[in-house]
Image (spheres, rainbow, N blue to C red):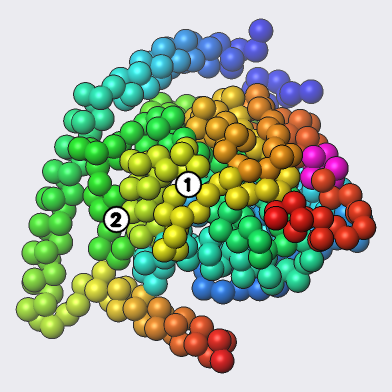
Amino acid sequence: MAPSFFKRQALRTRNGLAHLAGLERPVVARTPRDLVWQRETARLWRYRSDDRSIHVPLLIVHSLVSKSYILDLQPENSMIRSLAGEGFDVYLLDWEPAGPADAENTLETYAAGLVPSAIEATGADELTLMGYCFGGNLALLTAAAGADDLPIRNLVALTTPCDFHAIGFLADMFRPGRLDADDVIDETGLVPAAVMDAAFQSIKPTDQLVQPLNLWEQLWSSQRAENFLALNGWTRDQVPFPGATFRQTVELLVRDNRLAGGELPFAGGTVRLKDIKRPFLNIYCEQDTIVPAPSAAPLTGLVGSRDASELRLETGHVGLVAGRYADEVARPAIADWIRRHSKETRGNRHTARAAAA
Amino acid sequence: MNISSLPRKAFDAVERPVSDAAESIMGTDAFMDALAVAWKVQRRALRRVERTTAAGLHAFGVPTRAELLNELGGLQREVRELRREVEAR
């Protein structure tokens, strides 16, 4: 039960002062894990678990746009902890913030280099590859480009943009005649974190007024305040984006909208989504303002999988992976699909390869 | 009724329509065109300041922060390339 009005004000003052003094910073990403492989900015983590009863490992590819701790925000609010607790052998491929050395990294650097290398580093005969947001694009490109060579048994795209003309403001600002990619790339060859932050903030212009009020409302409870600060801190905790990848994103994905057409130039050839023959799950969200549902939905029909399904969920971009809805609806649905598609059969790998043929 | 929820309700009653209106305006071609022009003008002015500052620093033989970072980035790329060559052998 909530304390009285006056008690809450006293608690708000105490917790607010502790917050301002930096004494109550939320600790995030606490699920025990080991760094099992690292190359350049790519890091492959494996989560510790006593129960790895689902024998097909799950490799989550995080976006280049944000930090991965949203997937393991707090112990009671962690997609990764929840999946590991259900018997999945969970790996996470995430990225250290890009620096000037990464400015020339292209989509190929990731989807034809680092992601396949990380898959190999798991040592798995087959795995489920799941990408979140732009990580979904990297997973799709990896799976399409390496269709015959990579041990991908299932592919899951979490709120992954496909039709970039349906994204809205963020993409529309880069239509011909408006901004060019180089207008936001700094002299070190990166899109600065501050520009990324400004871009995301612009989606909800009054957010900077609303969020302090939301914090005030939660501040009487140190636990609620911590939850709020963890989530809200993540939304403002942006990372620089490699300039060369950004140029490709603007030219190929935003202006030419190539992914919506099902293919795009890649590594000197063409990559086609229809070459993805593995079981595929496309998950997108009705209230997503970053990757709106109409942008993500077409993916289901573009892949070549006979077993391609989709989940349209009543939540937002972050609500898919963190918070109560994620815990009660999204995570169980995702886990259920992957579990059903990870059942051991004789010659699983052969089956997966045959499906790709 | 919770006393503290009254000011919040009042705030929301104002904020929601303002937010909706702001989002609709931002979605118009005219706004996005104007924002793009404003961004480019600001960017050009900033570049001019950076070039002037760089020229001043260069006069004393001092590199800019970006030049140092790019130099470091170039070195890191060379190390990565060497590592790849070694691993490939």
- Left or right: residue A124 versus residue A258 is right
Q: Is residue B7 magenta?
A: no
Mark 1 and mark 2 in contact? Answer it, CB < 8 Å.
Answer: no
Q: Amino acid at mark 1?
A: Glu
Closer-to-camera residue (A24/A323):
A323
Which quadrant of the structure image shows residue B21?
Answer: top left
Callout 1: 10 Å neighbours few (<14), some, many (20+)?
some
Q: Which residue is under mark 2? A: A185
- Which residue lies at the image location 76% right of the left edge and 56% below the top edge? A354
Callout 2: 10 Å neighbours few (<14), some, many (20+)?
many
Residue B79 versus residue A261 in the image, above or below: below
- Which residue lies at the image location 47% right of the left edge and 43% below the top edge? A259
Q: Chain of mark 2?
A: A
Q: Which residues are magenta?
A: A335-340
Q: Is residue A337 magenta?
A: yes
Q: Position of residue A268 (x, y in %)?
A: 41, 63
Q: Which residue is under mark 1? A: A263
Q: Amino acid at mark 2?
A: Ile
Q: Quadrant of the N terminus of chain B?
A: top right
- Secondary structure at badge 1 equals strand
Q: How far apart are the two marked residues, 1 and 2, measured between alpha carbons?
A: 26 Å
Residue B52 versus residue B41 in the image, above or below: below
- Which residue lies at the image location 59% right of the left edge and 25% below the top edge? A286
- Which residue lies at the image location 47% right of the left edge and 10% below the top edge? B13
- Left or right: residue A336 versus residue A71 is right
- Secondary structure at badge 2 equals loop
Disc 1 or disc 2, which is closer to the eye?
Answer: 1
Q: Position of residue A339 (x, y in %)?
A: 84, 45
